[in-house]
Image (spheres, grey):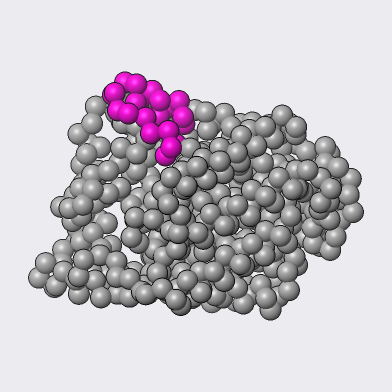
Amino acid sequence: MATAGHSRQRVADYGPTVSWADPLVWIIAVFAILDFVYAVSFNLLPDEVRLVIIGTLFLGQGLLGIASLLFRIDLWRIRVFGLIILLVSVWLISHAVLGNPFQAEIALRRLAPVLAALLFIGFADKLPSRFLAFGACASIAFAVVWAALQPSYFHGSGSDLSRFAPFHGGDEKNAHASSYIILACVLITHQALLGRQIPKTLGWGFVAAGVVLIVGYWSSQVQLALVAYFGVHTLMYKRVSWGTRFIAGLVFVGIVGALIIEKESRGLEDRGAAAYEASSAGTGRVGTWIDRIDRLQNRNATQLLIGEGIATDNYSSPTWPKLTHSHNLILTYMLEAGVVGTIVLHAIILAPLAVLGRPYLPFLAAMLAGSLVGSGIMHRAMAYMLFWLAVGMMVQRVQFSPHLQSIPSRLRGGLRFAAGRP
């Protein structure tokens, strides 16, 4: 079945039969394959080439997202677009008031994936899901080969923790960006499995390979996001008994606890028992958060309301002498966009929940979990773009699958789905 305004088309077992005669399907497919290629080849590209490609990909998909509002009138997508405009306005006002230079490139990186999400969700019936799934699997395969052929690296001075070599991130010299790319690819592959778009053995094999890579990159924020996604998905799944859900919940809590213990054990080894204090917890994160809270307390009313502008959360702290961000997205936005911008940001990421319902919860959990101890996937531009492709695939699966007993209908211009299986 299809919602009003959607073209009538034959519905396959788990999703619509996408017509490759449709130009929009081709446009999305071309951008998607360029996204995957750019994601895995980032560290192989010279800086000047990167800038051209990133501008083309993000500006192109962002503009397509805006244009999509004109062809299907969804009030909730228009509201999200209004919130995005409001966030940009907060940034511009804070830069104008305080005189800090506005970094348009960073603004484009942060906003283009959300703008593209307006297309991926609003035109979910145009997503070539099987094509996207094979793109994600190919990216995971590339990462496996890259990790096997490249020497491991050690993150941080004096660290003896060997990690898989990153393929994305450039001069950042850590595996957070690569790990988030793989997380997004795992989510795409998982949604394809749920939608029966790819064979089970193939799909679960690549999901397992992606999980191994994420563990091997040793990025705790991405590991937390992965656990949150599959944890919430498992707890929501209707075919799972409550006893199994309870056991799964204990397992996932145990995994999170093990991650924390492992992280703190490494911090104790690096600093020594005598130098290890409460502020050193989280490999220095707690001390950095305390420093950012102190900075917020010393700000005037204007700075508290609208912040100091985009990319201004870049300070040193007693536990982290180097210049870096807060490693907590709420603190980052409080510093950069103030109370107003922080509320607007969370309104943007919560908005799909009102129309997509329970199936969106695993994605929301992944976003929030990673952002508690890092910048999260929201500040990893290419991973965030692929993340919204996965959300679009979920919308396609839930909206068009008769097996999920969801009832898609237009209510005041917005897509609303009954609470079916995730």
For the image, the number of numbered tags is 0
Question: Is the magenta region chiefly helix, strand or loop?
Answer: helix
Residue, far left: 274
Question: Which of the 4 image quarters holds residue 147?
Answer: bottom left
Q: In which quarter of the image is the C terminus?
A: bottom right
Q: Is residue 116 magenta?
A: no
* Left or right of 78, for residue 403: right
- The reply, left or right, for residue 122 in relation to residue 382 is right
Q: Residue at x 11, y 67 (%)?
A: 275
Residue 217's place in the image compared with 380, above or below, is below
Q: Which of 365 and 33 is in front in this view?
A: 33
Q: Judge whether 231 appears above or below 291 on screen.
A: below
Q: In which quarter of the image is residue 141?
A: bottom right
Say if residue 118 shows up in the picture: yes
Residue at x 73% of width, y 69% of height: 198
The image quadrant of residue 3 is top right
Give the x, y percent position of residue 230: 56, 66
Q: Which of 227 and 142 is in front in this view?
A: 142
* Residue at 25% across, 65% down: 156
Segment colored magenta: 87-107
Q: Residue 413 appears at what percent x and percent y?
A: 74, 33
Q: Which residue is drawn at 62% across and 67% down?
A: 137
Task: List x then y, in percent, for residue 109.
Answer: 47, 42
Instruction: Say if the magenta span includes residue 106.
Output: yes
Q: Residue furthest top?
A: 97
Where does residue 234 sit, x and y in percent of width and height? 60, 68
Horizontal placement of 135 versus 400: left or right? Answer: left
Is residue 57 depicted above or below 240 in this figure?
above
Any part of residue 261 in sight = no
